[in-house]
Image (spheres, rainbow, N blue to C red):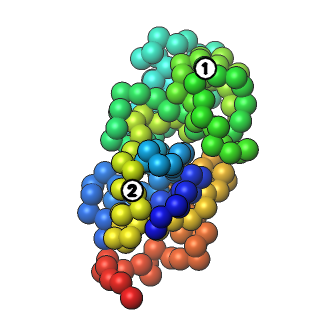
Amino acid sequence: MQNVNLTHQFLIAMPSMIDSVFSKTVTYICEHNEQGALGLVINRPTSLTLTSLLRQLSISSVDAQSNDASIIFGGPVQVDCGFVLHNPMGNWQSTLKINEEVELTTSLDILRAIANSEGPDKMLVALGYSGWEPGQIEQEIAQNSWLTVPASSNILFDLSFEERMPAALQLLGVDLANLSNEVGHA
């Protein structure tokens, strides 16, 4: 599995995944290169809302009701740091352009803009991220831990957390009920 680039792909955890952090998850890969991979779990909401996060950061919001979206658990690395996955919009201090449809911003200026109703139209706010060392993600795929499929912005931004796993599997033409817990190689 050399020279594969999983940027803007979904990793779908196989039913045999025993790691409680990633069991039953869909992870969006924001960056994958020779230094490893960075992604965000997109279907694991936390009990924290955007309103409460803004309050914790002492950022006042002009419209608290529009900020009641759940914050997602992006992964087990740097769980005290925020990551905003969003459609391209604005000029933020620290943004990774993933492609023409998706960017990842880690600076507070985007949260201030969101609080003032000046942020991106479509976004996910995560605490923490998922990271892999060089070659690690390729090894996990070879061990049948993950399915991969090109990502869809619609799944990222327009579907509920519960709908994201079935929709990602549908991109592959697979039904979760038809996946086996058994691992094997042909």
Which corner quadrant of the image does residue 52 belong to? top left
Badge 1 density bin: few <14, some 14–19, many ≥20, Cα 10 Å: few
SS category of the residue bearing label 1: loop
Q: Is residue 184 above or below residue 169?
A: below
Q: Which residue is mark 2?
A: 135
Left or right placement of residue 127 versus residue 91 in this view:
left
In the rendered structure, are the residues bearing label 1 and label 2 in contact, judged by CB atoms less than 8 Å apart? no
Q: Is residue 63 visible?
A: no
Type of amino acid under label 2: Gly
Residue 177 image point, x, y percent: 43, 78
Of marks 1 and 2, the one in the foreground: 2
Residue 39 image point, x, y percent: 47, 46
Q: Which residue is mark 1?
A: 93
Q: Is residue 83 above or below residue 159?
A: above
Residue 37 image point, x, y percent: 45, 48
Q: Of residues 143 and 130, which is closer to you in this image?
A: 143
**C-alpha distance separating marks 1 and 2:** 30 Å
Residue furthest bottom in the image:
186
Q: Of residues 181 and 145, which is closer to you in this image?
A: 145
SS category of the residue bearing label 2: loop
Type of amino acid under label 1: Gln
Left or right placement of residue 117 versus residue 82 in this view:
right
Name the residue at 51% across, 49% down.
Answer: 32
Q: Is residue 13 above or below residue 51?
A: below
Left or right placement of residue 55 versus residue 124 in this view:
left
Residue 56 image point, x, y percent: 42, 17
Name the residue at 34% across, 38% down.
Answer: 77
